[in-house]
Amino acid sequence: MSEFKIVGKPIPREDARAKAKGELKYADDFSLPGMLYGKVLHSKYPAAKIISIDTTKAKQLPGVHAVLTARDVPHNETITRFGQSAEVGKGFEGLYRVLADKKVRFRGEAVALVAADTEEIAEEAAALIEVNYEPLPGVFDPVEAMKPGAYLVGEGDSNIICKFGCSQGDIKKGFAEAEVIIEDTYQVPFVDHAYLETEGGVAWIDEKEVINIRVGSQVIEHFRDVAEVLGLPHNQVRYIGTMMGGGFGGKEDITVETYLALLTWKTKKPVRLFYTREESILCHSKRHPFIMHYKVGAKKDGRLVALEAELISDAGAYPYLSPWVNLYATVNAAGPYCIPNVKINTYCVLTNNTFTSANRGFGAPQPNVAYESLMDELAYKLKIDPLEIRRKNCITTGKSLSTTGQVFNTYVALPEVAEKAWKALGETKKVEDKNKRIGRGLAIGLMSYGRMTFLHDTSRCYVRLESDGSVLIRSGIPDLGGGQVSLLCQIAAEELGVPMSKIRIYYSDTALTPLAGTTTATRQTYMSGNATLKAAREIKKRIIQKAAEMMNVNPEKLVIGEEKIIVKYDSAQYLPLLEVIKACNTEGIELFCEAQFKGPFTMVPDLSNIRGTIFPDFTFGAQAVEISVDIETGQVEVLKLVTCYDVGKAINPLSVEGQMEGGSIYGMGYALMEEVVMEKGVTLTPSFSEYIIPTAADVPEVEAILVESGGGLGPYGAKGIGEPSCSIIAPAILNAIYDAVGVRIKSLPATPEKIIRALKKHYFEGR
Amino acid sequence: MKKTEIEFTLNGKKKKVEVKPSDLLINLIREELYLTGTKYACGIGECGACTVLLDGEPVLSCLTLAITVAGKEITTIEGLAQDEELHPLQRAFLEQGAVQCGFCTPGMILTATALLKEKPQATEEEIRDYMRGNLCRCTGYVQIIKAIKSCTTGGEN
């Protein structure tokens, strides 16, 4: 492989300078003359009938331009779609209702919209809307909601919105062969994305009567969904995606875009609408809570022979991405282990809680908590080292995933990353405090990158080499802060032999940039990276061909770099890039290209037994922690955290390390402190005073170890890392707590209260 | 509500504005003076994203009444770089990869500026403690702490 000039180098991102100077204009940093302010009236009950809505007083308030309810929305009910190009059938479709109609399903559901001259007037008008509710009992526990006769959240005859299964071998025979069996139930809570930038944007109508929505969104392809709500042609709605102040899956569904479009359409004026932090926590999606019943069987030597799991998740009030999240959970349910006999059943259930949808890791982090805790339990029971039991059972190159049977033909780094992470913990830290006990935990895992193959995913990118040797890129890629946009610049710079400073990129615009698909599913390095690579290489080919003619050498002997076309092994022989560009332009040789990259396509699987290829590829990783537990207070302190992933190829090591570190701490919050507490559908944690996320003071020493096998499907062999990076830290911490004090916490977060209670039980009451 | 005229220094320049007694500093800076580098993220003093320097001290502009800055000196993120020359902390944040989504960055950098003025030789432990009021959801703080440490006297780089 040739030597890289820009790829693989830890360089500052394209967008970092403007951000550090405070110059980057996020969604909320934009205004237009005559702009109105939008406000949403949210339901105050989690379950209620809407008897009537009276907007008279609100409309009479001076400064109010529009008050809208469900009857004002041209198509208030549509089907959720997520930018997929293939028909995927009913199993994945959900109801998207813009404003509550007749019935509210969760507290915080949008009931009415207001646009007014100022934010204060809009707020006052929203308070003047009189909604006459008749409270209904509702149902708040997914297990209750599954039962026949349960309160029905929606209009259907059951609250169960999807059932998935997959199996291999013979589960009965498997458990009959087992010499040790462990059975347990694990639970994980609702959590919030807690990005610093709340949901919002500005919309206006231009001279072509197009509704422009400038918004932070991970899925700009929602322009089609917004157009359908308004009954407009798709090309009459345009998304201009801004750099996001964090996304983590929370800006994957439509957030406020439809509200903005409706208000600007009705008032014919620009409208700005932003959620407060409280609205963000109350009204947008949460991570799915799961209840997970697991049964694992092994031989005395630690070899796994059977795994059976039943997963029940809470969809909250509307389906949104629940079916997809649950599919991820199902595929991940047996972990990264070779198990001959497996049976998984997954149920996703509507309740009157806040709806749940995508959150970094999708459905992977939840089952990972259960199976990795059980692996640890097994190791203790059989007196096998935690690393050894994983090495003995983990998938290796050529083996297959135990849920779907998908075979791994490229390098499976699990044994390597597990060993590296565990050994990097080094010597045990000394702690003086007599109440503090030290423990260590390990977890390994795998997670897909790239969307499900039956979605028929594509990404496009346009690259143009200018006559002065600068480069222009246009890509629909949304950037949620992970460096997605900068990555494309780096690839183009590498391929066309120009410095990063000569690249300009336009991104995330449904009218002007080629659609690059969603910034979700850890897919952009892989999908849009490859699309950019393809476009840039096409231009490079033409440049080299022309240079070869000009120099009278074989094109294979030429390479491009430092703005020159150079004869390999003879750097004295070269042509300046500018000269070749001039020659190409004179002859009309196209120095621009729009390329499309296509992921592998498969059919929609049988959802009752999901087998075969569901995802293009997987990222493998291991995380290890050393912690202390204070036996008097129950407080856990993470002392050292090691995160080790095979990232294929780190195109920008600074960004990759940033993902691995940030993902680890995101997962540490999940393990130890984060929970959106809901009591009968009412959120008790509506601010950062109640919803606690890690601060600089909570962060331990973090070591990120990058393995670069080059085995990924992305450019230069890269794999995706954004979501895998956060998906196994929670069980590593739970395992460390057990190692430290001998109690196993089976529900997240592992708060001091839970640990103290478990310790009391352990020491005073026996187990 | 009656408006009062106040005068203060913003990023080295004198400003004269009319404010209502209830106006918040964050709204004055963002909505009236169009300096949008100061970020709104919680509105109730829990996240640090709206931090600005008031006579060199970090304050939360979402909890500060605009009228109280009369006669004082405010520095926002836009006032830190000298033309094209970045402030050493801004440069360090770039070089260490401490900027991801960037939404916490202005507040982080301004708080860190105050920290370095107070304790030029801050240890890693002191940095963590001082920065605990500024939330970041992307980086896990690792590269942010590294960037700040590199700007201390005796820090690497």
Image (cartoon, coloured by chain):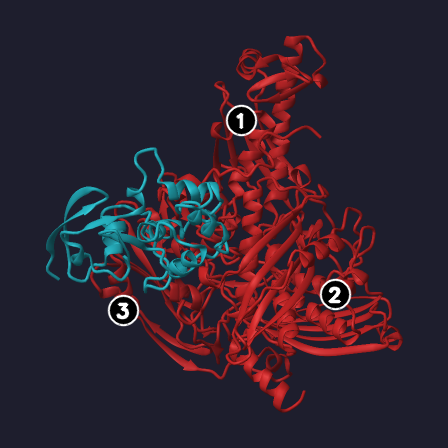
Chain colours: A red, B cyan
Label 1 vs label 3: CA separation?
55 Å
Q: How many neighbours does mark 2 have within 10 angstroms: few (below 14), some (14-19), or many (20 or more)?
A: many
Marks 2 and 1 belong to one chain: yes
Disc 3 secondary structure class: helix
Answer whether residue A238 is visible to the viewer in this image: no
Left or right relative to A185: residue A606: right
The residue pinned by badge 3 equals A56
Q: Amino acid at mark 2?
A: Ala
The residue pinned by badge 2 equals A334
| Residue A596 in the image: above or below residue A673 | above
| Residue A316 in the image: above or below residue A486 | below
Q: How many neighbours does mark 3 have within 10 angstroms: few (below 14), some (14-19), or many (20 or more)?
A: few
* Residue A259: x %, y % from top left: 40, 57
Label 2 vs label 3: CA separation?
57 Å
Chain letter of disc 1 in the image = A
- Relative to the observer, which residue lies in front, A698 or A278? A698
Residue A406: image quadrant is bottom right
Q: Quadrant of the C terminus of chain A?
A: bottom right
- Residue at image point 72% right, 43% down: A709
Residue furthest out toward the bottom: A765
Q: Amino acid at mark 1?
A: Arg
Q: Amino acid at mark 3?
A: Thr
Marks 2 and 3 belong to one chain: yes
The residue pinned by badge 1 equals A464
Chain letter of disc 3 in the image = A
